[in-house]
Amino acid sequence: MDLLLIEDDELLGRGIAQALGQSYRVQWIRDGRRGLSALLDLKPDLVVLDLTLPELDGLEVLREARRQQVEVPILILTARDALDDRIAGLDAGADDYLLKPFSLDELEARLRALFRRAQGRAEECVRYHDLEVDTRKRQLRLNGEPLTLGRREYALLLRLLDAQGQVLTRRKLEEHLYGLDDELESNALEVHVHNLRKKIGKDLIRTVRGVGYMMDKA
């Protein structure tokens, strides 16, 4: 999946590109004019757009992209926290608006949600083979029967479902499941994967040796 990051802050841009590079092919552009060209030419799956950019303001990038009928989901990432700025961004065609400073986990969650909506999977019920997940009610069914998962098993399942067809590294999954203050045993992730396989079926989650885990596209 291709993601275009338009962000002029060197330190922040590098950090975002590195973090998102675990799940996306990231193209990082540092000014608005080149960012607009890349947006029009590359046709990425998702865009993360800063508003305060050299050469061309982010709002102008957004307006021109929408004027040219570019429908890719665009998330604005900015320090502009005034209500008028947020309204202007959304009215110009942004799909979401996230303020700096922010959590990388939240950024990734919002991007996953944007991509699901773009793919027609905005519905709250996710189906994968014989598994059905109601994300609003946090209820699961397997072959029509209720299924109970622990909190981290549920979070792990949703992360793998959101990334169907992609390999998620051990580190990425551990960062998703555990906070910085949590004590993490060396085999904790493997235990959760093992328990999840016992409940949903051992063949739905694949181990990519030396890298991590994945679920194939349904």
Image (cartoon, rainbow, N blue to C red):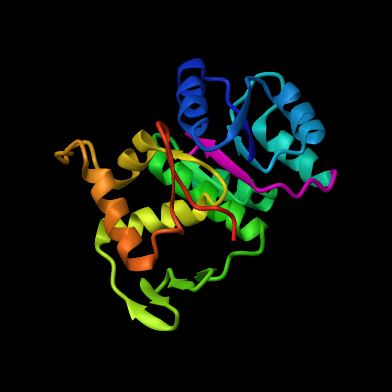
Query: Extreme right residue here?
Result: 68
Residue located 85% across and 43% down the image: 68
Q: Is 75 in the magenta?
A: yes
Q: Main secondary structure of the magenta part?
A: loop
* Residue 36: quarter of image: top right
Which residue is found at the position 71% from the left and 40% from the top?
62
x then y, percent, for residue 86: 55, 47
Q: Residue furthest bottom?
A: 144
Residue 203 lies, in percent from the top left, at 45, 58
Q: Going by the image, does 114 lie left or right of 168?
A: right
- State the image coordinates of residue 12 (x, y, percent, origin top left): 46, 23
The image quarter in which residue 39 lies: top right
Where on the picture, by quarter, is residue 40? top right
The stretch drawn in magenta includes residue 158: no
Numbered marks: total: 0
Q: Residue at x 70, y 48 (%)?
A: 92
